[in-house]
């Protein structure tokens, strides 16, 4: 229901047949629809998960280089990661930061004896699109003496053997170990 119809509903019924009142309601309704869209857009800017034009402000406030040529999702991932990456470094914090970059399942394991952290990508096949941003974020928050390994997932021979011809033709080389990236 448009704002014009809502506006007309508030008026007494004898106004409903008057052409001038309908014109006024349509004009007011169009302006109210624009106002409603603007308010929704403004509220979206308060959250980095939905921000668009205010994303550069988040980046500036968090000392992240502003790069408008990057896709919005990648820029949001960097902002969210930076916001999550404060406090005592733990496996759960590293997982939380890594999850900001990757929509799939991620597992973080810490091997304190070897001074190593391993980030396993469980769902994403091949190299994630913004792995370099993730590496930079993890490098910025991890202790200096810890090394980080990134365990990427590729299709196995058994998975490839079980695929149909259509599935094989739709699969890009970067999803296969040793495939071109």
Image: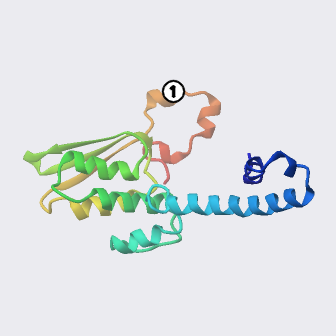
Q: Check the image and report above or below for 91 versus 159.
A: below
Q: Is residue 135 visible?
A: no
Q: Check the image and report above or below for 33 versus 12.
A: below
Q: Check the image and report above or below for 121 versus 47.
A: above
Image label count: 1
Please state the horizontal and vertical placement of residue 158, each as a whole percent of the image.
45, 27
Q: Is residue 33 visible?
A: yes
Which structural element holds mark 1?
helix
71 sits to left or right of 146 = right
> In this view of the protein, which residue sits in the foreground, 83 or 122?
83
Look at 51% across and 66% down and name the residue there.
70
Q: Residues within 10 Å of mark 1 (few under 14, many from 20)?
A: few
158 sits to left or right of 32 = left
Look at 51% across and 27% down and name the residue there.
161
30 sits to left or right of 181 = right
Please state the horizontal and vertical placement of residue 111, each as a whole percent of the image.
14, 44
What residue is disc 1 on? Answer: 161
Look at 45% across and 36% down and name the residue there.
155
């Amino acid at each position: 229901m448009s704002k014009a119809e809502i506006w007309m509903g508030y008026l007494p019924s004898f106004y409903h047949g008057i052409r001038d009142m309908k014109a006024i309601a349509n004009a007011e309704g169009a302006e109210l629809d624009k106002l409603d869209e603007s308010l929704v857009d403004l509220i979206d800017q308060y959250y980095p998960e939905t921000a668009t034009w205010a994303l550069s402000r988040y980046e500036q406030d968090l000392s992240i280089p502003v790069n408008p040529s990057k896709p919005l999702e990648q820029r949001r991932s960097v902002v969210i990661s930076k916001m999550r990456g404060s406090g005592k470094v733990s496996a759960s914090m590293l997982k939380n930061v890594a999850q900001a970059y990757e929509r799939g399942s991620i597992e973080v394991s810490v091997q304190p004896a070897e001074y190593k952290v391993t980030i396993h990508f469980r769902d994403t096949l091949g190299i994630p699109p913004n792995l370099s941003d993730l590496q930079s974020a993890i490098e910025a928050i991890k202790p200096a003496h810890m090394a980080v390994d990134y365990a990427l997932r590729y299709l196995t021979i058994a998975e490839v053997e079980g695929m149909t011809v259509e599935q094989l033709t739709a699969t890009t080389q970067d999803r296969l170990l040793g495939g071109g990236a």
